[in-house]
Amino acid sequence: MPATARARSLALLLGLAAGFAGAVFEGHRAAHYSKPSGFRRLHQRISPESSFYPPFSMLENLALARWQPGKTVVIIGGNSVLEGAGQSADHLWSLRLQELLGDRYVVVNLAFSGAYPSEGGALVAESLLKRHIPVLYVANAANGPQARPYESTYGWLFWDARAHDRLLFNPARTAELDLRFTSALPVVRAQLRTSELSARLNALLGFEELWHHVAYRHFSTIWTFVTRDRFWRPRQDFPDWGPDAPPPDQRYRDNFDVEMIITRGASQTFAEPDGQGGWRAAAGPLHQADIDIEEIFPQLLRPRMLLLLSQSSPYYRDRLTPEERARDTFVFRTYEQVWRRHGIHAVIAGSDFTADDFADRIHLAPAGGQKLAELVARELRQLHSP
């Protein structure tokens, strides 16, 4: 090969190496500043609903950017109920919660649509505690067994946090995960290993942090139906268009039979007749819930948790038979005690709300969001003094 050709080849290889090293360097830098500005919630255009999968560092930085010594961070996790579906960005219940709690607290809403209480915000709360930052964690859950943070749509956040050594020591969780790696079906083990390896590579190279920083602030490369009008725009330019609930007379019009099935399902499989005109908890789900809570939530986090058991709108609950209503009440109270038995403060949310407080069967209208903020603020004050 002529000397000129060799020189060009060498220059090309050196350029590729320099470019790769530069990208890795910028990825690690992005892990420290890739936080959305003017953030209120993870709305549709900065969430997996539009193929935007924020890395764990982005969520963590949202909390770190607002925290100051002497303040307590209130992390909101859970699903779309706590994200604020049914409330516009200006009427979010979490904004009202911040007002009620005052300046000694910092409220950060990290709830995702469809997320479990073990996901997203829970992992950020663990990381903050590991950094010795005062934190309270608020989430909501359904009755019955609970899913682990590596079992659903948002599982990448667990592996990302784990690879970056952000999680608290939890021997029960470690033992359960080790068992999966050794005893699960081959296809499950392969999925676990792939998720773990991908997260480790990202921790080393920072490619997820870099891509999401660029996509959020500069330009995006992924077309989605949600961002189809100008998919290349940076995600920070897409406003939160989540609407407020429609007027009360326009709610509850669709899928009544399906919504009633879901309302009954909140208690149907978790209780059985006790033979004396009352109810007793179904042993299987109750036992599994105990196992799940013990394996999912570290001991250090539990005293700093507020778990909300979300009830359906009374529009549907009032249409249950007297027997079904009694079962519903029994199950919610039973699982409230299950969480408390594990050292987690739990309350039933929605039992004293009206149908007008709901946007639909489960999501809250702005009026319901105000009541939720008042409930959470009251319970957090009982749980913690800044």
Image (spheres, rainbow, N blue to C red):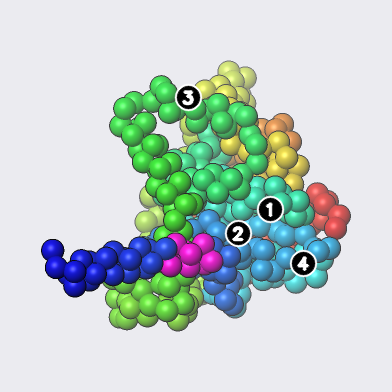
User: Tag 3 or tag 1, which sits nearer the N-term?
Assistant: 1
Q: Which residue is mark 4?
A: 68
User: Tag 2 or tag 1, which sits nearer the N-term?
Assistant: 2
Q: Which mark is residue 352?
A: none
Q: Which residues are magenta?
A: 22-30
- Residue drawn at (24%, 69%), measured in percent from left and top? 7
Q: Is the Cβ of the residue at disc 1 closer than 8 Å to that at disc 2?
A: yes
Question: What is the spatial separation of the Cα atoms under label 1 and label 3, in whole angstroms?
Answer: 28 Å
Q: Is the Cβ of the residue at disc 2 closer than 8 Å to that at disc 3?
A: no
User: Which residue extends farthest front?
Assistant: 3
Mark 1 element type: helix
User: Tag 2 or tag 4, which sits nearer the N-term?
Assistant: 2
Question: What is the spatial separation of the Cα atoms under label 4 and label 2, in whole angstroms?
Answer: 14 Å
Is residue 133 found left or right of 115 in the rendered image?
Answer: right
Percent position of residue 98, x then y: 72, 68
Q: Which mark is residue 179?
A: 3
User: As displayed, is residue 249 above or below residue 363?
Assistant: below
User: Tag 3 or tag 2, which sits nearer the N-term?
Assistant: 2
Q: Is the Cβ of the residue at disc 4 closer than 8 Å to that at disc 1?
A: no
- Residue drawn at (54%, 72%), measured in percent from left and top? 36
Q: Quadrant of residue 65?
A: bottom right
Question: What is the spatial separation of the Cα atoms under label 2 and label 3, in whole angstroms?
Answer: 29 Å
